[in-house]
Image: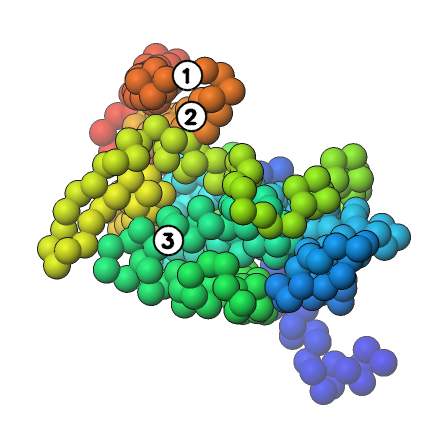
Amino acid sequence: MYRWLDERLSLSRLNKKFLRKAFPVHHSFFLGEITMFAFITLVLTGVFLSFNYEPSTRLIKHLGKEVPAAYASVLYIDSLPFGAVLRSVHHWSASIMIAAAFLHLLRILISGAYKKPREINWLLGLALLGLSVVTSFTGYSLPFDAFSVTATQIGYGIGASMPYMGEWISQLIFGGEYPTLHSIPRVYSLHVLWFPLLLAALIGAHMLVMLKQKHTQPAYAEKVAPGKILGVPMMPQQGFMMGVLFLLYLAVVFFIAGTWIAHPVEVFGPPTASTPAVKPDWYFIWIYGILQIIPGDLKVSLPFGAVMNSEFIGGVMIPGILGVVAVLLPFLDTRKTKLRYMELPTRHPVRTSVTFALLAFMLTTTLAGWKEEFGFSNGQLWAIIIISTLATYLVSYLIIISYWGRPPKGEAEEA
């Protein structure tokens, strides 16, 4: 059978060209695989959910009450054997995918693997992370309970706050001023079809570029096998390890999903005129924290009657600036690097310290999202954010140059 297929599909050539590619054996390199595993799990659980979900806001009778069909269908899913667990697996896999993609990009950043000739894969990775967050947001509204409607309205308001075209873009996505009769069907099509197709295309392109350019490697690989890729072939060794890791991933995510059932819609109930107190998931709460401490009446006038309000500044402009800097980074940082080897973070104190400072900024703005629970004032939180960010940079920089020394001029390119 193999010979028959080989004559027609050139399997031996495929095996030699792709399946024998060497993969470095290093734990940090599995973050990319975990991102892919989470995506696969999202697709599989999403198929089950789509079989039982009705993307409609029409009112139907459920347990003697009139409720939206989308809300009732989620209750029905939860009533099925393992239905609530599978929906919870879907929820937690979305969080794991975003976390793994973020950590993967963080490894690329501190190791300098975004530089020439790997700019394309850096941009693909950024697009993958951004689209993962957007796809997760479109899933917010689908349960159509009081929580999801309120949270989606906040996101709609942030998008609509963009000067000139924000209102038009938001209404295009949600089929009008959210919520409308067309909002759920339109967001549902984006969430289960178009965005997953784009994510699959980005993952495929990311992997193809990686196979073409080959992995970067830890610095010690240069001494062990100079000029070569140190690792194991894709098949069977790497494939076996990926299979074991995928089974381990499933075990962990099912344990989490069974222990902490995600988003119990019956607790929040169907949409009402009142607005429940909501907080977004962890990957949005740092933006929510910024919005909490920016004065609500802040407005900056622009030409032709447009304005930049607090929602735009905190929810779009600040994250947008960070995104633009990330996109431009490989084109601004043109210092030479060795093609195959990761740079040691300790040999690049400024870049490493800036990365730590950025993490401190995101953590302290996340703290701002809980200001009411902790009783902080806006002034106190601004002081914590600014001082923590600057102190993290300074302390990190001093520790690096004290313990590892300032890299001599021209040595920045060494791994």
> Would you name the residue on which mark 3 appears?
159
Q: Eyeballing the image, is 213 above or below 407? A: below
* Residue 259 in view (yes/no): yes
Viewer-side label of 1, 2: 1
- Where disc 3 sits, the SS reads helix
Q: Circle 3: is it few (<14), some (14-19), or many (20+) Cα within 10 Å?
A: many
Who comes first in sequence, dot 3 or dot 1? 3
Quadrant of the image for the N terminus?
A: bottom right
Residue extending furthest toward the left: 303
Q: How far apart are labels 3 and 2 at the CA level?
A: 21 Å
Q: Eyeballing the image, is 77 above or below 291? A: below
* Residue 263 in view (yes/no): no
Instruction: Identify the image quadrant of residue 304.
Output: bottom left
Instruction: Give residue 191's position: percent from left, percent from top.
Output: 57, 62
Asked whether disc 1 touches disc 2, contact meaning CB atoms under 8 Å apart, the reply is yes
Who comes first in sequence, dot 1 or dot 2? 2
Quadrant of the image for the C terminus?
A: top left
Residues 176 and 252: in front is 176
Instruction: Give residue 368's position: percent from left, percent from top.
Output: 42, 25
> Would you name the residue on which mark 1 appears?
376
Instruction: Give residue 180's position: percent from left, percent from top.
Output: 50, 64
Asked whether disc 3 touches disc 2, contact meaning CB atoms under 8 Å apart, the reply is no
Q: Residue at x 50, y 59 (%)?
A: 179
Residue kind at label 1, given as amino acid type: Phe
Q: Circle 1: is it few (<14), some (14-19), or many (20+) Cα within 10 Å?
A: some
> Would you name the residue on which mark 2 appears?
368
Q: Circle 2: is it few (<14), some (14-19), or many (20+) Cα within 10 Å?
A: many
